[in-house]
Image: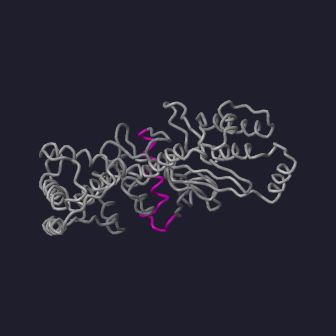
Amino acid sequence: MDANDQGLCALFPAHRQYFQVKFTVEELEVIQSCNDADDNTFCINVRELMSAVFASLLWGHLWKLAPHEGDSHVRFWIDNISAVAWSNCKSSRNGFAQMLLRILGRSDLQHGFYSTASHVPGADPERLSKFLASLGTLLRAGELSQSSSKHYSRVWGQWVAWCSMMRFSPWLTATDTDKNAEQLGAFAVYLWKYGMNRQQKGNTFSTICAKLCAVRWFHRNTAGYDPGVNASHAILLRGIRRITDPVVKQRPQSARLLRVIFVDINLTQPCDQLLWGGLLLGYFFLLRRSGYLFIGKRVLSYVLRLSGIQCFDTNEDPVPPKRAKVVGITLHGAKNNPFGREKVRYHYKSKDRLLCPVRADRWVNKAARTFATRPGDPALSMWNSGITSDAIRGRTDLLSR
């Protein structure tokens, strides 16, 4: 956090975000007046505290943990001792600062976090150097997304286990490229042949390259150097790519395929009603399988929920499915619109009696009443399970032959 006579700024390293706020002309005049009159109403101490309060209003919703995890702890790093003391004591004799502290306390309560402040010394080079180094560590940790970080950690565990089995050191050298190429090449061949899994099924070329990339990234991030390789390593990877079977691409659903599937469906059965409604939703809204189907017995956090399917008339007023002219879906975790609400995808009723997005909603809701699906449950739920991607694939593969 920082402030001066021109504005405020703050850095959020975990999310790689920052803000800069420039004071208005009226605020600049107040600051100049306070400085000339030696008035502490809007002094630099208050402005430093204001940067922390502004950060809580802007990012407070990101600091909230799950209900069972309790309150999160947020620490403000401020280079002003008075602002640090006010923030920690939640009290100040300055009236404007006390108002800011009340706003901060309300934000704490609203978003479920508690805040403390620490001082960033600006005059001690050694302590400042340590602080900047810690910020650098946070920024490097934020280079990868959460999913990529988990993937890289899992691959590093496989690498360490393989090196232990082969009696190699998991840390490659910084200068001996021939030795690095030999060890990484042996790991690549092992992955191609056995894959580091229980089925001992070899990995594809793209998976092997991703794992080798993760190993080298760990060296760059942890040891501070990139273990180089020689030309023979690139030749080995090209050989693996040539020998590996090509990836079988999945064809997208088509209207013709849906009509063929419809012939094989019994819409008097709730399971088939749910399956047909899900197929139509996936077709019209271009959904990924993880966006609306069960993957085995589980679903991902952003899967389409029953409450995420809504029916509207031509005036965009909510109506029962039988009177609907438009159907809209909201995916949990989707991008927000300019008003801060999740985006809703819409489709109008088609003139086709068979392939229609509004009819898809009717079939899903009809089956949901049979299965007693709650609004917060995945839309394609069936008691203890749901429509899986394997069921869709099996039905389409059988009928597309």
Magenta-colored segment: predominant secondary structure: helix
Name the residue furthest right.
Answer: 37
Q: How is the image coloured?
A: one colour
Q: Is residue 90 above or below residue 41?
A: above
Q: Position of residue 95 (x, y in %)?
A: 81, 37
Q: Position of residue 265 (x, y in %)?
A: 32, 55
Task: Left or right? Give the position of 99 relative to 305.
Answer: right
Task: Left or right? Give the position of 310 relative to 6.
Answer: left
What residue is shown at x 65% (from left), y 49% (from top)? 2
Q: Is residue 244 magenta?
A: no
What residue is shown at x 60% (from left), y 43% (from top)? 121
Quarter of the picture holding the C terminus: bottom left
Q: Is residue 93 above or below residue 265?
A: above
Task: Left or right? Give the position of 179 relative to 70.
Answer: left
Q: Is residue 363 magenta?
A: yes
Please name whichever residue, 137 or 115, is drawn nearer the observer in this view of the structure: 137
Residue 101, quarter of picture: top right
What residue is shown at x 48% (from left), y 39% (from top)? 374
Please name whichever residue, 266 or 280, is drawn nearer the observer in this view of the structure: 280
Would residue 323 be visible to someone looking at this image? no
Please name whichever residue, 99 or 343, is drawn nearer the observer in this view of the structure: 99
Q: Position of residue 180 (x, y in %)?
A: 19, 58
Would residue 18 be visible to someone looking at this image? yes
Q: Magenta residues?
A: 348-371
